Image (spheres, rainbow, N blue to C red):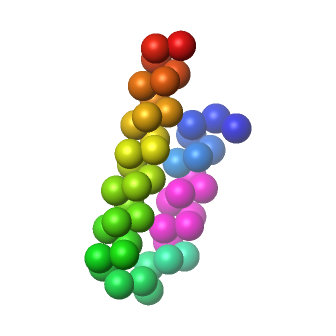
Amino acid sequence: MTMRDDIQDYEFLHAVDAPLSSEESRMRTYIVASALLICLIGWVLH
């Protein structure tokens, strides 16, 4: 699975989760963004 697939999956899930409260949605966005950043750093350092 490529990083692009991960982002597309996240965008799909985020669209599905739209009815969530803004605070929970923001927290999930922050967590996913952090995970993607960590993956990117790991890929670059590898």
Q: Quadrant of residue 20?
A: bottom left
Image x and y of residue 10, in percent = 53, 57
User: Tag count in the figure?
Assistant: 0
- Residue 36 placement, left or right of 8: left
Residue 11 magenta: yes
Q: Split into 4 quadrants, where in the image is the N terminus?
A: top right
Q: x, y (%) of residue 23?
A: 29, 76
The residue at the point 62 percent across, 44 percent down is 5
**Residue at 50% across / 72% down in the picture?**
15
Query: Residue 35 or 6: which is nearer the viewer?
Result: 35
**Residue 43 in magenta stretch:** no
Residue 43 % position (x, y):
52, 22
Question: What residue appears at the point 46 percent right and 29 percent down from the top-left corner?
Answer: 40
In this picture, residue 38 sits left or right of residue 23: right
> Could you tell whether 8 is left or right of 31 in the image?
right
Relative to residue 24, is residue 10 drawn left or right?
right
Query: Which percent across, then down, holds residue 7?
Result: 52, 48
Instruction: Note whether 42 is above or below 26 in the view shown.
Output: above
User: For the view shown, which residue lies furthest in the top direction?
Assistant: 46
Which of the 4 quarters of the picture holds residue 25?
A: bottom left
Q: Which residues are magenta?
A: 8-15
Q: Tell me: residue 21, above or below residue 33.
A: below
> Mostly what secondary structure, the magenta segment?
helix
